[in-house]
Amino acid sequence: MIFSMTGFGQGQVSGDDFVLAVTLKTVNHRFFDVSLRLPQEFQCFENRIKNLLKQRLVRGSVSAAVNLEKSGEVEAKLNQPLAAAYLRAAQEMKSQFNLSSDVSVDTLLRLPNVVVMGNGNFVEEGPLREKYQTPLEQALEAALAQVNEMRTREGAQLEQDLKQRTMAIADRVELIDAAVRSGEDALFEKLTADVSRMTADANLDRGRLAQEVAYLAEKSDVTEEITRLRSHLQQFLEMLKAEGEIGKKLDFLLQEMQREANTILSKTASVPGPARQAGDHGIAIKAEIEKLREQVQNVV
C-alpha cells in the first residue's frame, strides 16, 4: 500500500495543572521539511520532536505546533541577572554613542527571557523536563496516529487511481502496436512508390537507394519503444506494492514513459494509413502520464 503525504492530526494530554496540545499538518514536498512552533520553555524538546516526526512521516512538508495551557495561578519572575546585563549593555551604548534616551520598563519586558513564567526554571532543569516530556510524547503520538490514518486512507485512493491510469496507458500501448502492424502494408506501398519514382532516374545510385529505404523503415519502427513502455508499466505496477519511499522512483519511471511516448509520436508523425492512429494514442498516453505525475507528487 502506498501512502499520501497529505494529513492532519491533533493530540491532547491533560495534567494536574496543564493541558498540552499538538497539532500536525502535512502536505507534499520533495524531501522532509518541518516547521515547528513551540512554547519558549519547550525549546529543549525541539530535536526530539523533529526526530520523531522524521521517523514516522519520512517525507513531506510538516507544520507542527505545540501549545501549553497552564491552569491555576501562574507566577512571573524577573530574570535579574539577564535584565541587569541588558541594562549594562544599554548604558554602554548610551555612553559610547552619546545617546539621550533611557531603557524603559516596557522595552525591557519585551526582551527575550527577561521574565520567566512559572517557578522561574526552564524545562531542561530536571523536574520540569520530566513533568512535560511524557505528556508531550503522548500528545505527539496521538497526533501522528491521526495523520498517518489520513495518509493511509488517501494513499489507498491514490493507489487505485494510479492503477487505473496505468492500465489505461497499457491499453493504448497495445492499440499503438496493432495500428503500427496494420499499417505495415501501407508503409511498404509508400516506400515502393517512392522507389519507383526514384528509379526513373537512370543515374540513380542503387546502393544509396537501399540505404534510404532501410532508413525510412527504421525511422518508423516503434518496436523498441513499445517494449520499453510495457516494461516500465509493469515496473510501475509492481512498485505500487513495494515498502518504503516509492514516490521518487515512480516519478522517474513516468519520466522514462514520457520519453518513449515522445519518440513514438515523432516516429509515427509521417507514417501513412492506419499506423497514423498510433500518434493519437501516443498523445493520449502523454496526457495520462502528466496526470500520473501530478498524483505521484503526493506519494511518500
Image (spheres, grey):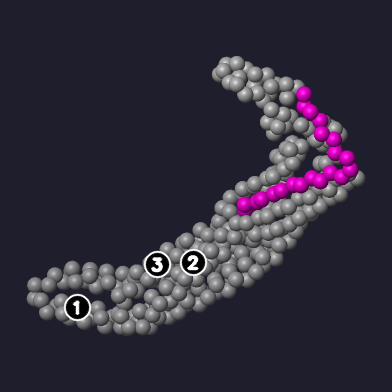
* Residue 205 or residue 127, whichever sits in front: 127
Asked if residue 65 lies in the magenta stretch, the reply is: yes
Residue 205 x, y percent position in the rendering: 14, 70
Q: Is residue 187 left or right of residue 26?
A: left
Looking at the rendered structure, the secondary structure element under dot 2 is helix
Looking at the rendered structure, the secondary structure element under dot 3 is helix
User: What's the residue at 76%, 37% (across, down)?
Assistant: 41
User: What's the residue at 56%, 18% (across, down)?
Assistant: 97
Which of the 4 quarters of the picture holds residue 219? Answer: bottom left
Q: Can residue 22 be seen in this view?
A: yes
Residue at mark 1: 195
- The amino acid at mark 2 is Glu
- Mark toward the start of the polypeptide (3 vs 1): 1
* Residue 114 or residue 231, whichever sits in front: 114
Q: Distance between the residues labelled 3 and 1?
A: 29 Å
Residue at mark 3: 262
Which of the 4 quarters of the picture holds residue 118? Answer: top right
The reply to whether the C-beta atoms of the residues labelled 3 and 1 are less than 8 Å apart is no
- Mark toward the start of the polypeptide (1 vs 2): 1
User: What's the residue at 69%, 45% (across, down)?
Assistant: 37
Q: What stretch is highlighted in magenta?
A: 58-80
Residue 189 x, y percent position in the rendering: 26, 83
Residue at mark 2: 290
